[in-house]
């Protein structure tokens, strides 16, 4: 395993540890952060991306997202192993979600609502509408990948503008589906939810699981193609 793939694994695990961690802190009863709200979640995910990218960027480029890896490859910004990165990202996401479960286990045990438990791990629609939900994830991921492709030319380089972009997407576009905008971010923790011994956890909502995988990839492809057309 190369250092790049190793740090994609490590970086994605850190991303989910902090990202799913803030969801657990807000959603689960008897935490000190319970019901602190959407603003905390959006900033938590933005900071999660910043920290994970800060650590992994020198070694892997800090994709931490299969959709971003695919988009960067199409745009000619990545010539490494797409399959290796995607596998590392997915496994890292499962590990990060498992660490969140270990840390918050007493709160998972005390939480009576299965939906709150699943919401710590995976996304879901506020209003079920396949077309609207798909477009929400597509547009959010389009903005992420398009922004990342142009971030290299920003006056403030590095992980900070990407972290701020995640906050902006979450605050403005994330309220419809919970803004997965990352297949590994949703699928990895959803797998963890399915296999971990979570008390009274209910279903993992596999009926929805395809959407936060397929829609972000479509959004990333469109962003990369527009970037190439404008370059």
Image (spheres, grey):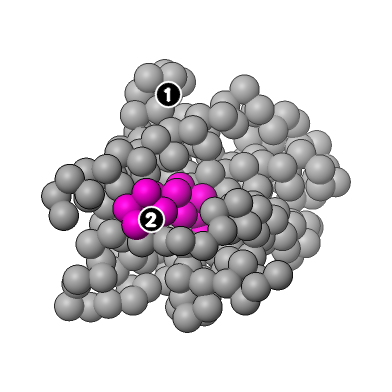
Q: Which label sits in the foreground, 1 or 2? A: 2
Q: Is residue 52 magenta?
A: no
The secondary structure type at the circle numbered 2 is helix
What x and y, as percent, mark residue 196?
81, 47
145 left or right of 130 in image: left
Q: Quadrant of residue 105?
A: bottom right
Residue at image point 72% right, 60% down: 95
Instruction: Work out whether mark 1 precedes mark 2 in sequence or the reverse, and give the earlier one.
Output: 2
Which disc, if any, is residue 72? Answer: 2
Q: Residues within 10 Å of mark 2 (few under 14, many from 20)?
A: many
In the image, residue 214 sits, relative to residue 199, either above or below, namely above
In the image, residue 132 sits, relative to residue 174, either above or below, namely above
8 left or right of 168 in image: right
What x and y, as percent, mark residue 2?
65, 73
| Quadrant position of the N terminus in the picture | bottom right
- Compare residues 80 and 60 and report the one nearer the observer: 80
In the image, residue 8 sits, relative to residue 68, either above or below, namely below
Residue at image point 73% right, 47% down: 192
- Give the residue furthest to the right: 197
Q: Is residue 70 magenta?
A: yes
Q: Which residues are magenta?
A: 64-76
Q: Is any atom of residue 94 visible in this view?
A: yes
203 left or right of 58 in image: right
Residue at image point 22% right, 50% down: 227
What x and y, as percent, mark residue 209?
59, 31
Q: Kindly check if marks 1 and 2 are in contact, taking CB atoms under 8 A apart as contact.
A: no
154 left or right of 82 in image: left
Would you say the magenta stretch is mainly helix, strand or loop?
A: helix
Which disc, if any, is residue 127? Answer: 1
Q: Is any atom of residue 24 visible in this view?
A: no
């Amino acid at each position: 395993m190369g250092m790049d793939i190793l740090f994609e694994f490590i970086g994605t695990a850190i991303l989910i540890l902090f990202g799913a961690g803030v969801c657990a802190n807000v959603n689960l009863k008897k935490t000190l952060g319970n019901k602190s709200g959407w603003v905390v979640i959006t900033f938590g995910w933005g900071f999660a991306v910043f920290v994970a990218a800060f650590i992994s960027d020198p070694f892997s480029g800090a994709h931490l997202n299969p959709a971003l890896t695919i988009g960067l490859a199409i745009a000619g910004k990545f010539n490494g192993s797409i399959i290796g990165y995607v596998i590392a990202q997915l496994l890292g996401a499962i590990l990060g979600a498992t660490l969140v479960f270990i840390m918050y286990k007493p709160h998972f045990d005390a939480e009576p609502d299965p939906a709150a438990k699943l919401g710590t791990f995976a996304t879901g629609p506020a209003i079920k509408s396949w077309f609207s939900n798909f477009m929400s994830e597509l547009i959010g991921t389009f903005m992420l990948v398009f922004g990342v492709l142009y971030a290299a030319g920003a006056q403030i380089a590095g992980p900070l503008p990407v972290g701020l972009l995640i906050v902006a997407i979450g605050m403005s576009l994330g309220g419809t589906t919970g803004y997965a905008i990352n297949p590994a971010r949703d699928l990895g923790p959803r797998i963890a939810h399915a296999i971990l011994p979570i008390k009274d956890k209910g279903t993992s909502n596999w009926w929805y699981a395809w959407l936060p995988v397929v829609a972000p990839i479509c959004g990333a492809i469109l962003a990369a193609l527009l970037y190439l057309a404008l370059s």
